[in-house]
Each structure stands twice: as C-alpha cells, then as structure tokens.
Amino acid sequence: MIPSEATEAIRAAGRRMDSRGWVPATAGNISLRLADGRIAITRSGFHKGFIPEDGVMTVDLDGRPEQSNLRPSAETGLHCGIYRRFPQAGAALHGHSVPATVLSRLAGPHITLAGYELLKAFPGLPTHEAAIRLPVLENDQDITRLQARVTEAWDADPAHPPGYLIRGHGVYVWAEDMPGALLRLEALEFMLECELEARRLPR
C-alpha cells in the first residue's frame, strides 16, 4: 500500500507542473521516497496533470516494481540513482519544459547560471552573488548507461547542484521533500527561461 498523502503529494505536483507547461502529453515523471525506503513513482503512460489515484506505484531502490504487473516510468532508474546517491533526497521531479529542452540542445557539457536572485533556492548559495554549473548529459535510451554518466558527472564535481539536464529532453531536480523539490524546479525553470529570453535579444 502507498500512503494516501504520498499519492496525493505526487498528484498535486503533477498538476502544478502541468499548469506551468513543464510536462506536456505523457512527458515527465515524479517520485517520492517513502518512510520505509520504497520509492513511490508515477506509472508510465499517464499525463502528469491528470494522474489517477492508481497512477502511482512503488519500486525498490533498484527500480524493481513491488507489483510486477505495473509498469513504472521509463526513467525510474534515474530517480533511483538520485535516492541511492543522496540519502537526504526525499523527492525527485523530471520535466520537459521548452527552455530546458531548447537550452540543453544548444549547450556544451554544462549550463552556467550566475547572478540570479533565485539561485538561493539551491543549497549553499545565500545570495545572488553566486553561480551554479548544471551538467548537461547526452540523452540515451539505455537508462543504466545514462545513469552511469550521471554518476560520473557527480563524481567529477563534488560541488554539483541538485539538478541536471538531459540534452534535448529535460531537467531533473531533487530535494528533501516534495515542496522543496517543487520550489527548486520552479526556481530553475525561471532562470532557464530568462536565459532563453536573453538569447532572443539583439546583441
């Protein structure tokens, strides 16, 4: 059984992300670490703005479904990678916004965000006088191989922020709980949108 409050937190997050245009069609996925260590995650194929009560399932830290007849999101392994690596992580969000998709297609191995007031949404950055380097990973349908690249990026930069981009695909963020993850996603999406708008201005 999944606690009703966990299911509702995921459904509410889906509605919030949908209202901002971050999860078109069946894109994106949402997860929450339960008190017993299991991971509650959105099932595959559902629009995240309209997740039904049975649209959430549980997996273990290796992504194995508790109910073998249910299919989790294709990128469940990336959520599990976050929870295995960061014991403090309690919620993870993946969205497909236009800014994240476009900028990740144009970027090199990372996107630098500097001077934004909303950088304070990330740990260790008390003022806007800071910068973060978001890793941009090449997209790969082999999730195990993609997670290995994510892990390499984490190992290479001990000061990495709690987020990364997949090229041409979208963004991942995580935090200690769902409100924190939503706050972090909103801050990041705002900054990415600003960066995209800045590219449209005449030089």
Image (cartoon, rainbow, N blue to C red):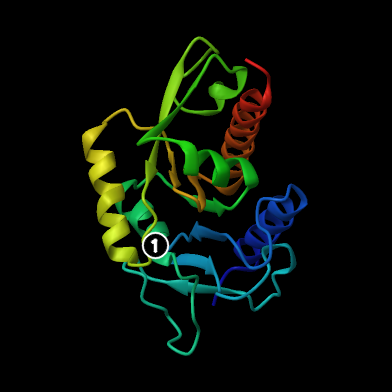
Residue at the extreme bottom:
69
Q: Where residue 136 appears, x then y in whole percent? A: 40, 41
Q: Residue at x 56, y 43 (%)?
A: 102
Locate residue 91, reporting x and y percent: 51, 51
Instruction: Indicate left or right for 185 with 140 as reference.
Output: right
107 sits to left or right of 28: left
Extreme residue in the top direction: 129
Q: Quadrant of residue 165?
A: top left
- Residue at 59% in and 52% down: 96
Judging by the rendered image, the residue that carries numbered circle 1 is 37
Q: Amino acid at mark 1?
A: Gly
Please provide percent x and percent y for residue 47.
68, 68
Is the C terminus in the top left, top right, bottom left or bottom right quadrant?
Answer: top right
SS under mark 1: loop
Residue at image position (45%, 19%) is 131
**Residue at 69% from the left image edge and 51% from the top image edge:** 17
